[in-house]
């Protein structure tokens, strides 16, 4: 990519969480200065934000339902489980990654997206 072009980042889940670091790095890394045109995060909060929420018991209680829904994250932290799942279920990943499946996923995401001016976006935790 030419050095003078800007990029638009879109991250989902863990990719979204890791991209928040790239967005933050734009403020101090000269290689990224002025390169990010926009960033859209889908289902992936900033780890700094999660850390600040978990400083209080109220914040921990607010995060509890999402922690339960994210059970699979803990599963993937168990040694050798991700490798076993990948080796036994590659066909499922390849099926989900077909262009027509991805196009449908993107279309669904875009159709449900709300502009940040709406109350649902402003009032998000």
Image (spheres, rainbow, N blue to C red):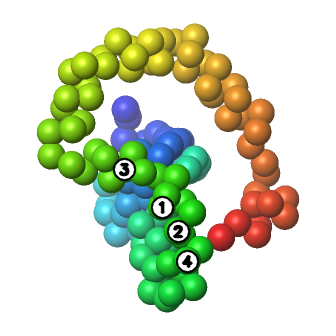
Q: Which quadrant, please, contains the C terminus?
A: bottom right
Q: Which residue is mark 4?
A: 61
Q: Which residue is mark 1?
A: 67
Identify the residue at horizontal 78%, vertical 48% (top origin): 114
Q: Which residue is mark 2?
A: 64
Mark 1 Cα-neighbour bin, 10 Å: few <14, some 14–19, many ≥20: some
Q: Which residue is mark 3?
A: 73
- The residues bearing labels 3 and 2 have C-alpha atoms spaced at a distance of 14 Å
Mark closest to the chain's N terminus, 4 or 3: 4
Mark 2 Cα-neighbour bin, 10 Å: few <14, some 14–19, many ≥20: few
**Is there a contact, CB below 8 Å, between mark 2 and mark 4?**
yes
Identify the residue at horizontal 21%, vertical 38% (top origin): 81
Mark closest to the chain's N terminus, 3 or 1: 1
Q: Looking at the image, can residue 57 be seen?
A: yes
Identify the residue at horizontal 70%, vertical 66% (top origin): 124
- The residues bearing labels 2 and 4 have C-alpha atoms spaced at a distance of 5 Å
Q: In terms of depth relative to the viewer, which is nearer, 95 or 44?
A: 95
């Amino acid at each position: 990519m030419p050095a003078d072009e800007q990029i638009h980042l879109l991250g989902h889940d863990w990719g979204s969480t890791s991209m928040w670091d790239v967005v933050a790095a734009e403020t101090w890394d000269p290689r990224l200065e002025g390169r990010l045109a926009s960033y859209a995060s889908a289902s992936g909060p900033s780890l700094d934000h999660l850390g600040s929420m978990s400083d209080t018991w109220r914040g921990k209680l607010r995060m509890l339902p999402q922690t339960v829904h994210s059970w699979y994250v803990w599963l993937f932290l168990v040694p050798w489980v991700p490798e076993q799942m990948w080796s036994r279920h590659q066909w499922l990943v390849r099926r989900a990654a077909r262009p027509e499946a991805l196009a449908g996923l993107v279309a669904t995401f875009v159709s449900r997206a709300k502009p940040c001016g709406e109350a649902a976006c402003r009032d998000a935790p």
